[in-house]
Image (spheres, helix red, strand yellow):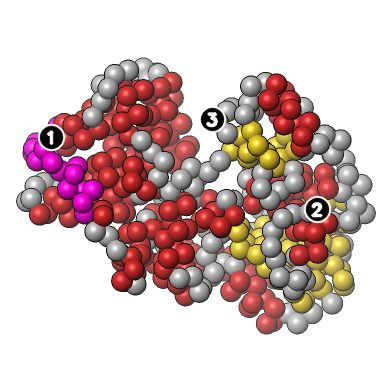
Amino acid sequence: MNPVSLLGHCMELLSQIERSRSTPADTLTREYVRSRKYLGAKERRAISEIVFATLRTKNTAEILTRRYLDTVCLTQPTSALASLMGSVAAVAPAWTSFEPTQVLDVAAGEQTEPARALTALYNRTTGSDLPTNWATELRTLLGQLDWRDGSITQVSLAACLPEWMVESLHAGGMESKDIVALGRAFMHAAPLVIRSAHNDQSREALLAKLTHDGIVAHPATLSPSGLVIEQRTYLLDHPLYRNGAIEVQDEGSQLVAFALAPEEHWRILDACAGAGGKTLHLAQLQRDRGLIVATDGDPKRLRLLARRLRRHQFRSIHITHHGTHSARLLREESYDAVLLDVPCSGTGTLRRAPEIKWRLSRRQLDRIVAKQRQILEENYRYVRPGGVLLYVTCSILPEENHEVVADFLKHHPEFVPDPIAHAFARYHIPLSLLPDQWQLQLMPHLHGTDGFYIARLRRR
């Protein structure tokens, strides 16, 4: 496809993503390319890569473009085109692993010049001409960004994060240099990580099977069950997935079950089970000898868990829907452990869903936090004396994490912090923790995982 037309498709898709406030960008991208049957595999992949590179760098790319166009008194384009121009010409190649020339070359089947194609797209869209050196000027402006002056605006642009999010991280104790490192880590695509899901299958044996099938992988750094796939691979049709030998699960998500460290006989309430990745992992760690009650407020997600459960055939997992008679009866019991992987902002998953950065607002965050506090209040009572309460989010924001837990502990003195280190030691997880450390914030720039918060509490 002509590179100008390809970039035009990217601009159109970006506009659709901007207008949507709820549908994930990857869902909109799949629907967009599938509805255009004339797009080949290389073109679909190029559109996806360009759009996601733009979403990851959107605020900085758009501002650079608009600043430059102001200086030369040219027509300001739509937000989608401004961010596309700034990202492809300057920000994404400088700060991510994105190589626009290579992506366009593959899709077009010939050598291309991204700046020239963007110039033509700008002219076609606005009717104005760009100076020949516009892309060089954008890169010069990018090099002049200096977050070290300490201003929220500069840190926001250097990290490609919204200003209110930078303020939140600052208030939580993060320094500017760490926020920039975090933001830059979020600009790179997350790796594909799988978990060995059979107790009678070593990670080494699984690695050998994958190698035999031509799938290049290496052991995960932290999770003893994790493997990182080193190439784009579709695994859902692979026999190892179909027979339940593997699960696709981020390494940080895998650490949640290890942090709970369940005994085989434990009764566990997974009160926000969702699609059940952590539920299945807990059953595996218990060797299917305990009892796990999995429930969630979203019946659709529980149906996904039911389908996954058929692949694994664990007998210890019992799925119940909120409000049903069986759910009420089971929740009248007390449990050795309660896992609360609460609904959250999802800011820990920005490598996968960068649109969250631009859709989330402080007002939405306040509503999310209120829901998290409500879930804690509704479920803490199911923890037996001496039992464990594990609070988890896939968020990097302190409002959802240690602030929620600190407030809970303030109002519930019957719960005390319980160190995570001894739980991780059981599984030889090579993560340096203080002996009394009971809460953990995983970060992509520090741990290579999604952003996860884990707090382990025990009832007196």
Q: Residue at x 21, y 54 (%)?
A: 141
Q: Nearer the viewer, mark 2 or mark 1?
A: 2
Image spot of residue 382 (x, y percent): 81, 66
Q: Main secondary structure of the magenta part?
A: helix
Q: Residue at x 15, y 43 (%)?
A: 134
Q: Nearer the viewer, mark 3 or mark 1?
A: 3
Q: Is residue 47 above or below residue 256?
A: above
- Please give the residue where the numbered disc 1 appears in the rendered image: 123
Residue type for callout 2:
Tyr
Q: Report, in whole angstroms, how far the alpha carbon at label 2 lies from the one at label 3.
A: 29 Å
Q: Residue at x 25, y 25 (%)?
A: 112
Q: Which residues are magenta?
A: 124-141
Q: Nearer the viewer, mark 2 or mark 3?
A: 2
- Residue 238 forms part of the magenta stretch: no
Which badge, 2 or 1, is on the more N-terminal residue?
1
Quadrant of the image occupied by residue 159: bottom left
Q: Report, in whole angstroms, how far the alpha carbon at label 3 lies from the one at label 1.
A: 35 Å
Residue type for callout 3:
Arg
Residue 232: assigned label? 3
- Please give the residue where the numbered disc 2 appears in the rendered image: 427
Image spot of residue 460 (x, y percent): 84, 77
- Residue 128 forms part of the magenta stretch: yes
Q: Nearer the viewer, residue 255 or 370?
A: 255
Q: Report, in whole angstroms, how far the alpha carbon at label 2 lies from the one at label 1.
A: 59 Å
